[in-house]
Image (tube, rainbow, N blue to C red):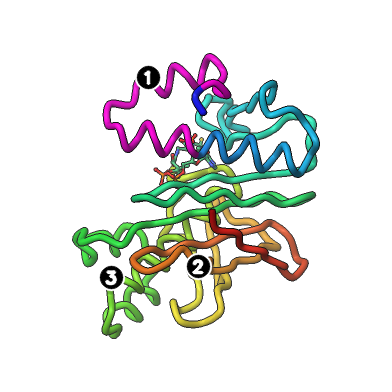
């Protein structure tokens, strides 16, 4: 798999200290190349991604395949690596392994006031919190802001309701946008966001 990485990716690969970080990174880039090759007909061995940030011109932007109408987004957590592909619309995807982080403290940084109130009444706060988190990070990855934009500006529907944006204030806010929960298996939450007004048709494939 490492043979498919370009020079910059190989440098990043070498900088990861933990074997699991190396594995997640190389798996994601391999998955991106194979999925994009299938979608575009391009050769995965010569595919190069750009990472320019449109907001500040830094190199931490959303990875893109220049010259293609196919957009993609990658996410990894625990032993899951997820890629989402769309044609003609920006996409963001996020997967989160549920863990025992201090949810009350994190909720202050991640959730809008009505979401914090809803979370407080939930039996399974860990599950609810991670579902909120994955939806919001998917939205901010679709716009390319990532965690540089405040998650508390976004208010999404309750974890057991169909995923949608209820309200979004602030500079990163976009409209129209569609949101969907994915099915990454027990102990994980995942969501995809697409900057479109068209209903989403999602095909999930597990390898
Ligand atoms: C994007 C980001 C939210 C992902 O964080 P994470 O939860 O640790 O990681 P995930 O596994 O969910 O996603 C990682 C993938 O997101 C993608 N990604 C990186 N930057 C991105 C961005 N700005 N927007 C969308 N996707 C991005 C990459 O494909 C990355 O995978 P890679 O390591 O194989 O390259 C985080 O890296 C971030 O906030 N980056 C900073 C963006 C920034 O500084 N913006 C400034 C705007 S001025």
State the extent of the magenta-drawn residues as a range. 3-27
Q: Is mark 2 within 8 Å of ligand 1?
A: no
Determine which residue is flagged by label 3.
Answer: 126
> How dense is the environment of label 2, judged by Cα within 10 Å: few (below 14), some, or many (20 and up)?
few
**Labelled pair 1, 2 in contact (Cβ < 8 Å):** no
Q: Tell whether 60 sits left or right of 180.
A: left
Horizontal and vertical percent position of residue 101: 21, 58
Residue at 48% x, 60% y: name it. Answer: 136
Q: Secondary structure at mark 2?
A: loop
Ranked by sequence position, the earlier of labels 3 and 1 is: 1
Determine which residue is flagged by label 1.
Answer: 14
Which is the main secondary structure of the residues drawn in magenta?
helix
Report, in whole angstroms, how far the alpha carbon at label 3 lies from the one at label 2: 16 Å
Residue at 77% x, 67% y: name it. Answer: 198
**Labelled pair 3, 1 in contact (Cβ < 8 Å):** no
- Asked if the magenta segment contains residue 116, the reply would be no
Q: Secondary structure at mark 1?
A: helix
Q: Secondary structure at mark 3?
A: helix
Horizontal and vertical percent position of residue 168: 55, 64
- The answer to whether 128 is drawn above or below residue 121 in the figure is above
Where residue 117 sits, quadrant-wise, is bottom left
Residue at 70% x, 44% y: name it. Answer: 71
Residue 92 or 82: which is nearer the viewer? 82
Report, in whole angstroms, how far the alpha carbon at label 1 lies from the one at label 2: 31 Å
Determine which residue is flagged by label 2.
Answer: 183
Horizontal and vertical percent position of residue 65: 69, 32
- The answer to whether 107 is drawn above or below residue 40 in the figure is below
> How dense is the environment of label 3, judged by Cα within 10 Å: few (below 14), some, or many (20 and up)?
some
Horizontal and vertical percent position of residue 20: 32, 37
- Asked if the magenta segment contains residue 12, the reply would be yes
Q: Is mark 3 within 8 Å of ligand 1?
A: no
């Amino acid at each position: 798999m490492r043979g498919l990485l370009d020079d910059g990716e190989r440098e990043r690969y070498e900088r990861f200290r933990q074997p699991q970080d190396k594995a997640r990174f190389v798996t994601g880039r391999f998955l991106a190349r194979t999925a994009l090759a299938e979608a575009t007909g391009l050769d995965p061995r010569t595919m190069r991604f750009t990472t320019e940030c449109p907001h500040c011109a830094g190199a931490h932007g959303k990875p893109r395949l220049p010259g293609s109408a196919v957009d993609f987004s990658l996410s990894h957590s625990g032993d899951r690596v997820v890629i989402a592909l769309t044609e003609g619309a920006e996409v963001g995807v996020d997967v989160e392994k549920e863990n025992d982080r201090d949810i009350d403290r994190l909720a202050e940084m991640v959730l809008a006031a009505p979401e914090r109130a809803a979370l407080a009444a939930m039996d399974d706060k860990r599950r609810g919190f991670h579902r909120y988190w994955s939806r919001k990070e998917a939205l901010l990855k679709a716009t390319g802001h990532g965690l540089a934009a405040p998650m508390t500006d976004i208010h999404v529907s309750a974890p057991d309701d169909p995923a949608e944006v209820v309200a979004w204030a602030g500079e990163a806010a976009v409209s129209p946008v569609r949101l969907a929960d994915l099915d990454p298996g027990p102990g994980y939450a995942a969501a995809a966001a697409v900057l479109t007004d068209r209903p989403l048709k999602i095909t999930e494939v597990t390898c």
